Amino acid sequence: MQTGYESNPTDPIDKMRVLDIKPMRTLKPIFPSQTGASPQSAPFTCVPPMGPFPPGVAPFYPFAFANQSQGASDFENAIPSPVPLNSFRTPQSQYSNGGAGSSKRGRGRPRKDKTGQANFDNSQIVVDDVEDFSNGRKQGGSSQKRAKGPTNLFSVEVNIDDTVNQILRAFKLSGLEPFQQAEGNRDLVGRIILTYNLLRRRVFQISEAKEDDEGGDVRPDLKASSTILTNGVKTNSQKRIGAVPGIEVGDIFFFRLEMCIVGMHAPTMAGIDYLNVKASADDEPLAVSVVSSGAYEDDGEDGDVLIYSGHGGVKKGEMCDQKLVRGNLALEKSLHRANVVRVIRGVKDVMSGTGKIYVYDGLYKIHESWAEKGKGGFNVFKYKFVRVPGQPEAFTLWKSIEQWKAGSGTRIGVILPDLTSGVETLPVSLVNDVDDEKGPSYFTYTSTLRYDKPFDLPIPSPNCSCRGGCQPGDANCPCVQRNGGFLPYNPLGVVLNYKALIHECGPSCLCPPNCRNRMSQAGLKVRLEVFRTKDKGWGLRSWDPIRSGLFICEYAGDVIDTSSAMELGSEHEDFIFDATRMYAPIDYNSDGSPEVPYPLVISSKNSGNVARFMNHSCSPNVFWQPVLRENGDKTYLHVAFFSIGHIPPMQELTFNYGIPKSDKAEQRKKTCLCGSLDCKGYFY
């Protein structure tokens, strides 16, 4: 086994030497002290979902945000991104798969850093689920060589530990009492998982831009989880039987560590989680949750029944009979006690290729158990789980969607199989299973903005000549440098940092269409559906699961003159996107108005795309981000939509419409039917 340490078998062994070896569980990552660190404020000229914020108050949009006008901060740069699987792959280190790391397993031995302190050897950490963004090999390549030394922005301006502490403060998860004592709720669980993902993606972006320098092999997933746990950012720490506060049936997780930090399933590897209860004079183990992800011979084809295989059966690398101990014994005791057990199903993450998505399928009871010969000829314990009736659909919905995609199942209420008539790379169904409405009013489907006249640039912008695609940290690429020295997206198309603006490659750039810096130009990343809601007209949702930060679509239509926008008739009112609207904060005393670089107003009345069907919500799951594409002395401003957190299939996609900057704003008030706990009762 490769351990990361060099050895010389010819050296004599000192058998008298006493070694001080600690168990793995006693080791903790050591991070530089942050004493005296003080984050700076940052310029902010748009509607990003988070920061920068004033000291002490920095909640994530849509919870609240505030404007800053001066200063500079690393915290501007923080979030994820999706891209077609056949897209150009940026050269990456073996640990740069989107912050997920290698899928190799090891024993997590400590190593010494330059200070002599023990730290984790990331290549040896045990990890059982990762995001697979590419094969990790260098391919393609830029037409320029990446600059090294002092031109590397990572080593000069960006510090990972400062960045993660800024994010923790922004989410109000730093300087407070540890969350281990708190019982979770929907808001807290969402913030903790989102914080973990922001940390992971930002660390990946910084690490990716640091080629061949010390620390370039940082494992973003492990760095993020270590930081989260070290700072006490965890909830529902007390194990419990039954539902977990703040987590609903159908919720999805892209990392097992996400389940761990919110109390859904504590083990990062084991499939059975259990607690000990007092039974007569002895403690008795009872199962609280199981993860069925394909590691064992489970049978999960039936949506309401799971035949779960016990754990174990391997000793010193050899197959053997499973024993009725630990998790297996807990399942047996739960059978006799008839307590409910949480079931999490692992399904293949089609977008990443090899990763897993974990779906909370609700509460089950164990109805029977037995032992049988497994494929290797040894005894395996089997447990029959049956789903408790009356719960919302989860895994059965995923199976139905698979059938719709394969054409073997019927989607009820389909009006059109593809609303776009082939304009988009993926079809968009038009569905109504609510009433007799036959479809929205006529419009021409277009996938992008239509400009009569682009905006002028005071200074012509240079185009890039990266014929193999833009590379992270390339000091010679003007597009990368306009983004602060980083690529804004990961290879899956998740936006990696929240900045005032994203600068994508423009029409005159020589990079290919599948360059990672053309993410919003590559079309839809998920299979969407326009559907009839019960009380809000038409809405938008996805057949596919959407990971946090994923690009969904841009807002397409006709760019209109701002001076004439208010003069449009009432029939246009529901199809106007105004980038200059204000977004009122919740926790900070500021007008919270976005300041985009150009006054962009879009009408999707006559031509548009799926974005025109997105409804308002006071607690949205989608946010918009300004994207600039420059071409010589002209620039084109676009509006791209990204997911805030993970979004399960068939959940409506919504964003906050904001408040118009107009004296007639009050006249445009409409009753809000978003149904969220934070609903204001109206929107504009």
Image (spheres, rainbow, N blue to C red):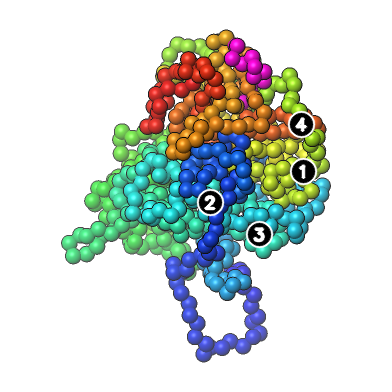
Count neighbours of disc 3 (C-alpha within 10 A) and say few if under 14, some if 14 to 19, many if 20 or more: some
Q: CA distance from mark 1 to mark 2?
A: 28 Å
Q: Tell me the CA gap for discs 4 and 3.
A: 36 Å
Count of numbered circles in the view = 4
- Was residue 597 drawn as part of the magenta stretch in this picture? no
Which range of residues does the magenta coloring cover? 555-568
Instruction: Choose the circle earlier in sequence order: 1 or 4.
Output: 4
* Residue receiving disc 1: 478
Q: Residue at x 45, y 64 (%)?
A: 314
Residue carrying label 2? 166
Circle nearer the N terminus (2, 3): 2
Q: Find the distance from the CA under tag 2 to the CA under tag 3.
A: 21 Å
Q: Which residue is mark 3?
A: 216
Q: Residue at x 44, y 50 (%)?
A: 173
Q: Assign a secondary structure to mark 3.
A: loop
- Look at the numbered disc 1 and give the secondary structure of its residue: helix
